[in-house]
Image (spheres, rainbow, N blue to C red):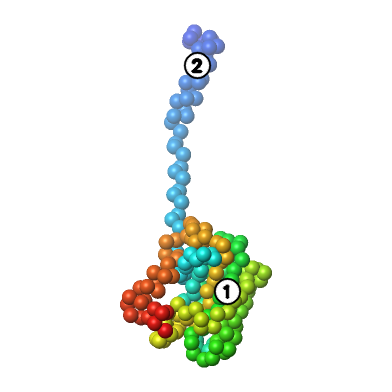
Amino acid sequence: MTPTPPPLSLRHPFVLATALVTALTLGACQSPPPAPVPAAAAPAPYSGPTLAVAQSPRGVQIFLPGSALFETGQASLNPAESGPYLSRVADLLLHKTEHPVVLEGHTDNTGSDATNQALSEARAQTVRRELIALGVPAQRLKTEAYSYKRPVASNATEEGRRLNRRVEVLVLDEQLDTLTRGEAPNAFESAWDRLKSMIDQGLVRPAAAS
């Protein structure tokens, strides 16, 4: 049997090419749509410690809470309380700034000036050792000791004395915006706003009342 020839319209090369393009286009239109790209997972909410911070003419001050620091006459830390705060400070120093750091040791007014001078230096050295153990280069950390000469609250109450037994972390020549940029809103609080709130609640008295 003689095969039936294709229609005359498909014998012409241009017509044949056009027909092929049309067929391919229709086939593409019938292809299934690409799978949707999954939405990016929302970042986990910040659950670390909130650091009290302040901008000063010398740089950024970071205040560690009294619960994480020292008992009267002691230079040793409570690891369970201080660990999260020191880890957070070390992370900031390693990843948000390259500036040098001064660790300022302070005491309450219990005991003699000589005793408190030595104690404030020992406290600063304790925090320095902890930060070095967490990876902060030793050459970036220096210590200063101020005895009970720079209270942040009156020593007339136990809570005020607890606030004064402290080591302040001072990041020299740094800006607060640099350290806090891109961080969760609850990762930091104003140290002076917190202190004012404690004074307003009657928990502590101003340092001038010492």
> In screen coordinates, is 144 left or right of 62?
right
User: Which quadrant of the figure has residue 116?
Assistant: bottom right
Mark 2 closeness class: few <14, some 14–19, many ≥20 residues within 10 Å: few
**Kind of element beneath mark 1:** strand
- Residue most toward the left? 201
Q: Is residue 34 above or below residue 42?
A: above
Query: Given the image, on which type of amino acid does mark 1 rest?
Result: Leu
Look at the numbered discs 2 and 1 and tell me whether their residues touch, using CB distance below 8 Å: no
Residue, x 53% and y 12% (percent of image)? 14
Residue, x 45% and y 77% (percent of image)? 152
Which residue occupies the foreground of this view, 175 or 7?
175
Residue, x 50% and y 16% (percent of image)? 18
- The label number, if any, that marks residue 61 in the structure image: none
Q: Is residue 167 visible?
A: yes
Name the spot of residue 193 as percent of width and height, x first.
Answer: 39, 69
Which residue occupies the foreground of this view, 101 or 16?
101
Residue, x 45% and y 58% (percent of image)? 43
Q: Which residue is mark 2?
A: 18
Mark 1 closeness class: few <14, some 14–19, many ≥20 residues within 10 Å: many
- Label count reads 2
**Kind of element beneath mark 2:** helix
Which residue occupies the foreground of this view, 183 or 16?
183
Q: Which residue is mark 1?
A: 103
Q: Is residue 177 above or below residue 210?
A: above
Query: Given the image, on which type of amino acid does mark 2 rest?
Result: Thr
| Quadrant the C terminus occupies | bottom left
Q: Is residue 6 above or below residue 91?
A: above
> In screen coordinates, is 194 left or right of 91?
left
Name the spot of residue 190 as percent of width and height, x first.
Answer: 42, 67
Which residue occupies the foreground of this view, 187 or 157?
157
